[in-house]
């Protein structure tokens, strides 16, 4: 079992930056892939970025490519999302997710088993 807690959300002006952190509890976190998703009001939840269990592979949605960076520290049980050049359309609740299957070699864009409660990111124009 893995529990996830997000932090670092807030209000920022367009062009600004934020860093989200996800802290996990559970001995198996270091062996599973992780990802960030987001859900804007009235829209479906969407994949933002993902990282494999070792951190060797990452994947990003086209809407955040070049602006967001996902990273992880398995010694600290954390996964971070550095967000630069934020846009009003990045406004959403951001969720951290973890895979239910260990040692997967590729980043998944769906099918995550564990989820955090979310943190709000609001970008003003």
Image: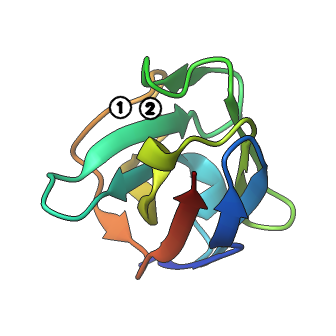
By what rule are the colours in the image chosen? rainbow
Quarter where residue 21 is shown: bottom right
Res 104 label: 2
Q: Are marks 2 and 1 in contact (CB under 8 Å)?
A: yes
Res 42 label: none
In the depicted structure, whether residue 69 falls above or below residue 61: below
Could you tell me which residue is drawn at 57 percent across and 58 percent down? 123
Does residue 35 appear in this view? no
Could you tell me which residue is drawn at 29 percent across and 52 percent down? 112
Question: 87 or 46, which lies in front?
Answer: 87
User: Dot 2: what SS?
Assistant: loop
* Residue corresponding to mark 1: 108
Give the spatial CA distance, label 2 vs label 1.
Answer: 9 Å
Is residue 26 shown left or right of residue 13?
A: left
Camera-near label (2 vs 1) is 1
Q: How dense is the environment of label 2, judged by Cα within 10 Å: few (below 14), some, or many (20 and up)?
A: some
Q: Position of residue 22 (x, y in %)?
A: 64, 68
User: Dot 1: what SS?
Assistant: loop
């Amino acid at each position: 079992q893995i529990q996830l807690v997000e932090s670092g959300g807030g209000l920022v002006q367009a062009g600004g930056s934020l860093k989200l952190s996800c802290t996990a509890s559970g001995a198996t976190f270091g062996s599973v892939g992780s990802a960030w998703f987001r859900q804007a009001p009235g829209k479906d939840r969407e994949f933002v970025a993902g990282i494999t269990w070792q951190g060797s592979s990452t994947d990003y949605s086209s809407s955040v490519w070049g602006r967001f960076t996902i990273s992880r520290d398995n010694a600290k049980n954390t996964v971070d999302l550095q967000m630069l050049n934020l846009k009003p359309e990045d406004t959403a609740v951001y969720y951290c997710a973890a895979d239910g299957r260990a040692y997967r070699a590729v980043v998944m864009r769906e099918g995550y088993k564990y989820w955090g409660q979310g943190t709000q990111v609001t970008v003003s124009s």
